Image (cartoon, helix red, strand yellow):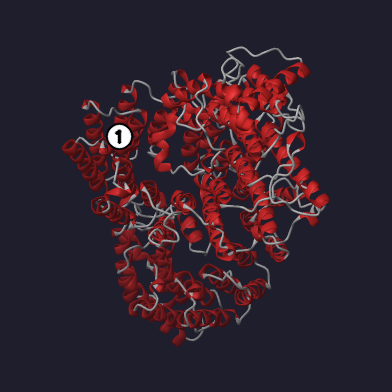
């Protein structure tokens, strides 16, 4: 030992002279000559000693942070009392931190990434540099690079990655430009990466690139030496400075773990999957020295030198878990998160399969593997899969082969409960409580396992009740809170002490009740319960309400919907010490969604007040008010929305970043004009669309570019404007989307354009609409799934033909229907089937056709629908609109038996409805008025007319028993009396009684008055009107006679939704 110590000193001195270095002082981390540390430990194994010293310096970066452990480790390193520390362990690789634990460890994780990390890295780099300086063939020196030094260097760089990562708080507070430059120079000097780092632009990606270069260089030299030797030594070869090091699994895991931490995204997935698959190929015999010259699909030129183990896969699982936890809006975001959970499960199966094939215990999934996948499923609300994995862990944990690798713990159980708290299943809270009881049994029967319910457990169960729509959900959440308080008080158990998350979950349960029962007394009571809980918190010494707590209370009052509830929320807002943006937005949304004009005005005032307050408003605040105004669908509100949008642009241009309009802001304005009913809506919408595109360029904001919703809303505005040429402009917009290629039109875009064409009623419009439908079919068949026509697409074109007035309209409509039927039969998967609206559109085309056979064809189609429906095709179920269209086909024909045919269809409707076979076949007032019209216009023989009048009287008796009538039925029956019944006392008696009943119901419209003139004798007219009907002004009729008459606009709307406009 003495001889080695002397040689070490000589080697150190020679190296100092060669490098022109001066002797280190005591401040140089304890590596000075006087400390005796190098003399004692380098003599035994210099690399191990200095590697341990590096690891000792890095202890603050691997413990809980800058606390006692971290400080003690740093002090021990400086004093020379260095424990023998193994190289970086697998725990340094990426791992899973379930959401249930994140809230508890967040403050600790922030304290980790502090200046202590930077100081530890500085010292470690100094020690590593000294280790490199000892390598060389000096005076018999045999010290050189080995696997330990390679791994220690990679581990050191991985810590630098954490500090520089944008997700690290240290990166914001401590890695200023001067620190980055210092680190870069120190790394270049100590570790000497193949490509020196650029101090001016140092980033985590630069460190990752350096780590990969070091790995690739090690692979290159190893493969070159083993190929030259014709033998794979299986480990490090040679000694001294010329040593060849074989990267082991720890080398790869350190790099891949660092990459996963810095790039928990699609880029990270691609990188890790690429490495792992290459490692699998090598293990499976698909790569080796003979393939050293082959290149893969990336920049790596040499196969990896180690097979993957569970830690390797766990880093990949970690990224999927993070992506499954990422909050995204809408169905697409939810589907993306769910897909990452499913992919994580597939990787777990891949690990199990590899273990079954190789029997390598290192690749067996461990607790982290299973827990990560479990956590991924829990985060997307798939609690059933999460619990299935938990049960599987419990089973294999009792298998001797697996028990050392897999054991459930409290985190696994709490993660599963977290999944049930996010689940949308009806029985989610009950399943969560069942799991809680299971944990309680384990705590009682197997106390050594440490699975004892804590406050995180109870908070998750309360969260499940909070999100539930069960009638007693809020009460049960409150009961569990009380239970926690009692257990905590009885045993003074801090593990069960309710925290702010627990209280907020219960508050959320009451707020959910308030929203669910909006407008009812139960909603107001729920808001009161939430307020009482806040008052209890305010009086408590343990938990005080935070801003989030008050925001939940604001939400409860804002959504209660009772008189004065929004004002109550405003009162709470004004009493808050520090309301945030959410506080203001919640109250603004409460007024905005009230629906009353004064409430909308109040929301505008609050928005203005918010701008003047200490809480800055944002685009969200404006969007809330704009959306409420847009939903009203008036020109006045559309103008207000556009004015607010103008204001947002001005404020953003003046420097107020938070008010920058986003795509949603412009889309709300476009929707406001689409719903306004203004003839200028198309022009206004196109102007906003251009502004949107111009501002995207002006502000260099690609996220502000018009999207598919923007184009669809603009096209809808054109369709609703009713202006001549609007349909052609809509088609031009669709053409622009194809031409520019920035926004791909989808099914909704095409449907909106076809709707604009159909509404135009221009000659040839049906032909143009069908051409667009054909284009959709062609694009879909070419592989564009986003434009697959749906039932709306076909029904829009069918309706266009029905309304076109073309001679062959019925034939064209029927041909499209049969084409759709054929596609529904041929397509696999989820085919598009014609629905009742499609059939009723074709029936409506028959009713407008001049073809004498049109009524019979309509009846045949109706019969076919009935047959398909009774055979199990629910899509073909004929509803009242379909029956009405078939009746209308007969009513508009010149057939002498049209009244009889219409009555037969009516009888079928009544039979199907009363028997329960088809509850959609219930006759409506429109049914009877159409039949009465058929009766009134029946020609033919006296016998035909007598039969028609009998049918009319029978139908009218049914009309009188209807819950809703609109006066048209009375007018049609009076017309039938005038045309089918001979003049005389009998007719006058009937007409007089019908008119009296019409007056009593307040349904006398202008058509009724006109037909009284046709049906009543002059004497009867003077008796019931006081004068002749033709001299009577409708405006002068008593108000009570016409008080329930629909306006023309209402009638048109009712006819429109019935498909008979």
Residue at coordinates 39% horizontally, 68% vertically from top-left? Answer: 924
Observer-nearest residue: 307 or 115? 307
**Measured from the top left, where is residue 756 in percent x and y?**
64, 54
Disc 1 target residue: 499
Image location (x, y in percent) of residue 83: 50, 30
Badge 1 density bin: few <14, some 14–19, many ≥20, Cα 10 Å: some
Percent across and percent down for residue 1054 are: 46, 58
Q: Name the foreground residue: 82 vs 12.
A: 12
Circle 1 SS class: loop
Foreground pick, 163 / 47:
47
Q: Quadrant of residue 188?
A: top right
Residue 989 appears left or right of 976: left
Report how many numbered discs are placed on residues in the image: 1
Q: In this view, does 12 lie above or below 899?
A: above
- Nearer to us in this view, 47 or 302: 47
Residue 739 shown left or right of residue 81 in the figure: right
| Residue at 36 percent of width and 57 percent of height | 1027
Q: Is residue 904 visible?
A: yes
Above or below: residue 940 compared with residue 70: below
- Image coordinates of residue 671 in percent, x first then y, are 56, 43
Residue at (44, 71) in percent of width and height: 880
Reply above or below: 158 against 16: below
Judge left or right: residue 1042 versus residue 35. Answer: left
Determine if residue 561 is in view: no
Quadrant position of residue 404 = bottom left
Location of residue 134 by image quarter? top right
């Amino acid at each position: 030992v003495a001889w080695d110590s002397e040689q070490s000193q000589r080697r150190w001195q020679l190296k100092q002279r060669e490098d022109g270095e001066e002797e280190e002082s005591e401040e140089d981390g304890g590596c000075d000559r006087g400390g005796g540390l190098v003399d004692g430990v380098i003599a035994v194994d210099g690399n191990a000693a200095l590697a341990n010293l590096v690891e000792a310096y890095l202890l603050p970066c691997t413990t809980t942070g800058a606390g006692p452990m971290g400080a003690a480790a740093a002090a021990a390193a400086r004093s020379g009392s260095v424990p023998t520390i193994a190289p970086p362990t697998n725990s340094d690789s990426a791992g899973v931190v379930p959401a249930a634990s994140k809230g508890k460890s967040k403050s600790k994780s922030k304290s980790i990434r502090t200046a202590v990390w930077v100081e530890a890295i500085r010292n470690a780099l100094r020690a590593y540099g000294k280790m490199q300086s000892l390598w060389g063939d000096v005076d018999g020196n045999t010290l050189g690079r080995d696997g330990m030094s390679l791994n220690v260097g990679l581990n050191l760089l991985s810590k630098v990655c954490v500090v520089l990562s944008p997700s690290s708080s240290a990166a914001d507070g401590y890695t200023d430009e001067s620190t980055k430059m210092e680190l870069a120079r120190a790394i270049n000097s100590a570790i000497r990466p193949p490509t020196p780092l650029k101090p001016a632009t140092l980033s985590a990606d630069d460190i990752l690139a350096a780590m990969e270069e070091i790995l690739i260089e090690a692979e290159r030299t190893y493969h070159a030496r083993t190929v030259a030797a014709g033998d794979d030594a299986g480990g490090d070869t040679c000694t001294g400075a010329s040593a060849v090091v074989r990267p082991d699994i720890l080398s790869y895991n350190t790099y891949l773990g660092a990459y996963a931490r810095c790039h928990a995204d699609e880029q990270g997935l691609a990188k890790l999957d690429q490495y792992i698959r290459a490692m699998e190929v090598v293990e499976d015999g698909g790569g080796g020295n003979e393939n050293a010259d082959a290149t893969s699909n990336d920049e790596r030129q040499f196969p990896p030198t180690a097979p993957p183990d569970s830690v390797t896969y766990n880093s990949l699982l970690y990224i999927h878990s993070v992506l499954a936890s990422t909050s995204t809006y809408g169905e697409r975001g939810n589907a993306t998160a769910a897909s990452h959970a499913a992919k994580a499960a597939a990787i777990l199966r891949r690990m199990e399969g590899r273990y079954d094939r190789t029997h390598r215990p290192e690749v067996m999934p461990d607790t982290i593997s299973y827990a990560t996948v479990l956590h991924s499923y829990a985060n997307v609300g798939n609690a059933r899969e999460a619990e299935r994995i938990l049960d599987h862990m419990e089973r294999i944990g009792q298998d001797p082969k697996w028990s050392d690798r897999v054991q459930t713990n409290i985190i696994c159980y709490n993660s599963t409960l977290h999944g049930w708290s996010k689940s949308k299943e009806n029985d989610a809270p009950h399943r969560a409580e069942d799991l809680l009881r299971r944990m309680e049994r384990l705590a009682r029967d197997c106390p050594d396992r440490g699975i004892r319910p804590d406050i995180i457990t109870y908070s998750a169960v309360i969260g499940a009740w909070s999100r539930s729509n069960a009638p007693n959900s809020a009460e049960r959440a409150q009961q569990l809170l009380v239970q926690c308080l009692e257990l905590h008080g009885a045993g003074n158990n801090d593990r069960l002490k309710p925290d702010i998350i627990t209280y907020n979950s219960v508050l959320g349960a009451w707020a959910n009740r308030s929203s669910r029962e909006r407008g009812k007394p139960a909603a107001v009571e729920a808001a009161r319960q939430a307020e009482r809980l806040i008052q209890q918190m305010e009086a408590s010494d343990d938990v005080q309400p935070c801003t989030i707590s008050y925001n939940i209370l604001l939400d409860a009052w804002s959504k209660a919907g009772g008189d004065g509830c929004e004002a109550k929320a405003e009162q709470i807002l004004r009493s808050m010490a520090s309301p945030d943006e959410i506080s203001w937005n919640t109250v603004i949304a409460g007024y905005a969604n009230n629906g009353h004009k004064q409430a909308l005005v109040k929301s505008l005032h609050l928005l203005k007040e918010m701008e003047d307050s200490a809480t800055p408003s944002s685009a969200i605040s404006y969007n809330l008010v704009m959306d409420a105004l847009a939903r009203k669908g008036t020109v006045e509100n559309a103008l207000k929305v556009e004015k607010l949008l103008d204001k947002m642009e001005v404020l953003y241009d003046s420097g107020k970043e938070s008010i920058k309009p986003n795509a949603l802001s412009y889309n709300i304005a476009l929707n406001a004009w689409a719903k306004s009913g203004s003839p200028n809506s198309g022009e206004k919408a196109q102007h906003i669309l251009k502004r949107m595109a111009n501002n995207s360029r002006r502000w260099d904001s690609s996220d502000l570019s018009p999207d598919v919703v923007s184009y669809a809303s603009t096209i809808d505005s054109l369709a609703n404007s009713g202006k001549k040429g609007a349909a052609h402009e809509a088609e031009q917009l669709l053409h622009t989307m194809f031409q520019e290629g920035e926004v791909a039109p989808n099914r909704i875009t095409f449907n909106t354009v076809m709707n604009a064409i159909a509404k135009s009623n221009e000659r040839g419009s049906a032909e143009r609409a069908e051409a667009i439908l054909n284009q959709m079919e062609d694009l879909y068949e070419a592989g564009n799934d986003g434009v697959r026509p749906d039932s709306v697409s076909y029904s829009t074109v069918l309706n266009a033909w029905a309304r076109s007035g073309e001679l062959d309209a019925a034939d064209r409509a029927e041909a499209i229907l049969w084409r759709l039927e054929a596609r529904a039969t041929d397509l696999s998967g989820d085919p598009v089937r014609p629905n009742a609206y499609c059939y009723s559109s074709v029936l409506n085309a028959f009713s407008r056709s001049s073809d004498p056979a049109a009524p019979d064809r309509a009846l045949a189609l109706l019969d076919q629908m009935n047959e398909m429906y009774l055979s199990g095709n629910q899509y073909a179920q004929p509803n009242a609109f379909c029956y009405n269209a078939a009746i209308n086909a007969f009513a508009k024909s010149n057939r002498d038996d049209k009244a009889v045919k219409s009555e037969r269809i009516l009888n079928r409707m009544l039979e199907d409805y009363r028997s329960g076979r088809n509850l959609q076949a219930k006759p409506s007032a429109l049914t009877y008025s159409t039949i009465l019209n058929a009766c009134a216009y029946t020609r033919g023989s006296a016998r035909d007319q007598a039969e028609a009048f009998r049918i009319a009287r029978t139908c009218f008796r049914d009309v009188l028993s209807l819950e809703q009538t609109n006066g048209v039925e009375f007018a049609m029956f009076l017309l039938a009396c005038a045309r089918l019944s001979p003049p005389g006392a009998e007719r006058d008696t009937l007409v007089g009684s019908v008119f009296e009943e019409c007056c009593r119901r307040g349904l006398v419209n202008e058509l009724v008055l006109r037909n009284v003139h046709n049906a009543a004798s002059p004497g009867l007219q003077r008796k019931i009107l006081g004068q002749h009907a033709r001299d009577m002004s409708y405006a002068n009729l008593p108000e009570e006679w016409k008080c329930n008459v629909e306006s023309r606009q209402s009638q048109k709307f009712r006819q429109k939704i019935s498909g008979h406009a």
